[in-house]
Image: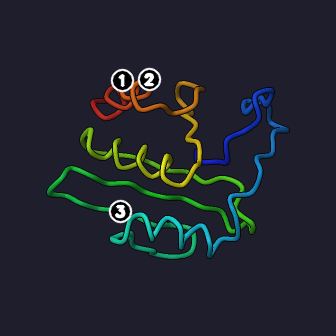
């Protein structure tokens, strides 16, 4: 899950947690597309980044809620795919939440979780 970084006292596991909006749907797409020019929009809520030669496949899943408060990002492939995702989060100032681990995504801390999921 991708969201704006929550405050230090926020509990993202709380079902009542509401992240600050990332922005209007069209602006979120524009920011991601600027960072990843080969991003393909299949419809407003489903975007993909595919670089098969590099072992990279990232899928972006958004609801039709506007403004966008969070969205899913499914990362498949090699470590390069994971790096693309983390680079995007860092560039845009957003936070990834590793749903499986229940922790914020960090480059080194989440890499092991990514490798286990990719191998499974």
Image height check: is 6 above or below 68? above
Q: Is residue 39 left or right of residue 106?
A: left
Quarter of image, res 63:
bottom right
* Closer to the eye: label 1 or 2: 2
Residue 26 x/y as whole percent: 62, 76
Tag 3 secondary structure: strand
Numbered label tally: 3
Among the two numbered marks 3 and 1 on one chain, the one whose residue lies closer to the N terminus: 3
Badge 1 is on which residue? 112
User: Along the polypeptide, which appears first: circle 3 or circle 2?
Assistant: 3
Q: Check the image and name the residue furthest to the left.
A: 53
Question: Which numbered disc, 3 or 2, marks the residue closer to the eye?
Answer: 2
Q: CA distance from mark 3 to mark 1?
A: 22 Å
Point out which mark residue 109 bears. Answer: 2
- As rendered, which of 60 and 26 lies closer to the eye? 26
Badge 1 vs badge 2, beta-carbon distance below 8 Å: yes
Residue that appears at 26% across and 44% down = 80
| Kind of element beneath mark 1 | helix
Q: Say which quadrant the C terminus sits in.
A: top left
Query: Residue visible at 54% across and 55% down?
Result: 92
Report which residue position mark 3 lands on. 49
Q: Nearer the viewer, residue 70 or 86?
A: 86
């Amino acid at each position: 899950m991708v969201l704006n970084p929550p405050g230090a006292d926020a509990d993202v596991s709380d079902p009542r947690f509401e992240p600050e909006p990332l922005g209007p749907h069209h602006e979120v797409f524009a920011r991601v597309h600027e960072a990843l020019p080969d991003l393909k929009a299949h419809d407003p809520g489903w975007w993909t980044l595919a670089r098969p030669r590099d072992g990279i496949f990232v899928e972006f899943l958004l609801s039709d809620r506007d403004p966008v408060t969070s969205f899913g990002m499914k990362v498949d492939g090699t470590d390069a795919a994971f790096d693309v995702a983390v680079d995007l989060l860092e560039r845009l100032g957003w936070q990834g939440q590793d749903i499986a681990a229940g922790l914020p995504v960090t480059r080194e801390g989440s890499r092991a979780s990514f490798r286990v999921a990719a191998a499974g």
